[in-house]
Amino acid sequence: MIRNVHTRDLGAPAGPFVDRVQELWPPAWGRQEFDRPLGVGADGGHGPIRYRCTSYTPGESITFEFTRLSGSHTLSASGDVLRHELVGDFAFVDRVRWALAIRWLHDACIEDLFDVCERAAGREPASPARWSWYVRQVRRLFTPRKRQPQRAQASGRRP
């Protein structure tokens, strides 16, 4: 069983940030998009990570079940504290993927989200998230590169 928890004191009531998760999602991690307004039954995700909203209490918590993995993640608020919890009972291959890459990317993504939320709450994070060398390398390895337009090659011959 995998359990991964992140918390952040925003210095302001955290409830509204649960409702604004899609709006505040850090753009470096792919847009968080759904097939309908955020609420129970909404299918979507960000980048290659797909999930469905299974529980939503406005101003309190939202839970998503993964569609390709056995597990969920929940964003919840308690006072000024925003909390994200991922719980998964992944198959062996997915546990290896988690250990080698996904965990590090997930941690960086959630910390980036919390930085955006803290700024939206009106204060600069005390220690803003920084991507580790490993996260930068894994992102480089798995992020599709944009194709550069081909330039006409000069042949050096005259007509």
Image (cartoon, helix red, strand yellow):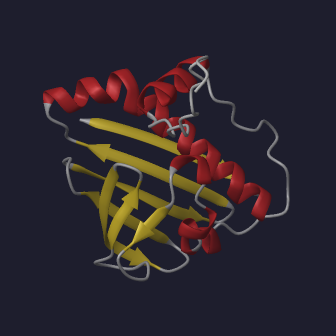
What is the residue that sits farthest to the front in this orientation? Answer: 159
Relative image position of residue 53 (x, y in whole percent): 33, 70
Q: Quadrant of the C terminus?
A: top right
Residue 108 drawn at (x, y percent): 56, 36
Q: Which residue is the extreme one toward the right?
A: 123
Pick the residue in front: 152 or 125: 152
Q: In the figure, 130 relative to 23: above or below?
A: above
Question: Would you say 135 lies left or right of 121 here?
Answer: left
Residue visible at 60% across and 57% down in the picture: 82
Residue 20 shown left or right of residue 124 in the figure: left
Location of residue 4 with respect to 46 vertically, above or below: above
Query: Looking at the rendering, which quadrant does residue 96 occupy?
Result: top left
Image location of residue 72, percent across then percent down:
30, 54
- Percent position (x, y) of residue 67? 22, 57
Vertical comparison of 157 with 47: above or below: above
| Residue in view at x 26 percent, y 43 percent | 88
Q: Quadrant of the N terminus?
A: top left
Residue positioned 43% across, 78% down in the render: 38
Q: Residue at x 51, y 59 (%)?
A: 31
Quadrant housing residue 153: top right
Q: Nearer the viewer, residue 19 or 85?
A: 19
| Viewer-proximal residue among 24 and 29 | 29
Give the number of marks: 0
Using residue 114 as the reference point, say whether residue 142 is left or right of it: left
The single residue placed furthest to the left in the displayed view is 91
